Amino acid sequence: MSKSNAIVVSFETPVMVAGKEVSQISARQPIMRDIKIAAESYNASEQPVAFEMLLVANLLGISERECEELPPAVYNQIRAVVQPFLG
């Protein structure tokens, strides 16, 4: 992923992501394949949270389980940055 395609989210206080303490995390911009993968696992209209979490996890390069372990405030901060790319 080139630096220009990375979405970087910085945290005031370091947080645990995928077992590592980080002060920022990079997500790549989504492509249609990411949406397809999430759609094959979850119906977006019936399970919007699960659909979105899988999509965000893929963009961060972490597992769905690791995404589930993020504190809500951290997830919402990441979500706010990624959301504009989702339409």
Image: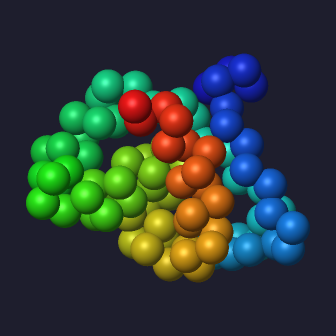
Lateral position of residue 75 relative to residue 86, left or right: right
Q: Looking at the rendering, in which quadrant would you find the C terminus?
A: top left
In the depicted view, which residue is nearer to us: 62 or 23? 23
In the depicted view, which residue is nearer to us: 12 or 64? 12
Residue that extends furthest to the right in the rendered view of this protein: 12
Can residue 41 be seen in the rendering of this structure?
no
On the image, the x and y values in percent for residue 86 come to: 41, 35
Residue in view at x 45 percent, y 55 percent: 57
On the image, the x and y values in percent for residue 80 come to: 58, 51
Lateral position of residue 60 relative to residue 25, left or right: left
Residue in view at x 68 percent, y 45 percent: 26
Lateral position of residue 87 relative to residue 82, left or right: left
Q: Looking at the rendering, in which quadrant would you find the N terminus?
A: top right
Lateral position of residue 16 relative to residue 24, left or right: left
Model colouring = rainbow
> Which image quadrant is residue 19 in?
bottom right
> Which image quadrant is residue 36 in?
top left
Can residue 68 be seen in the rendering of this structure?
yes
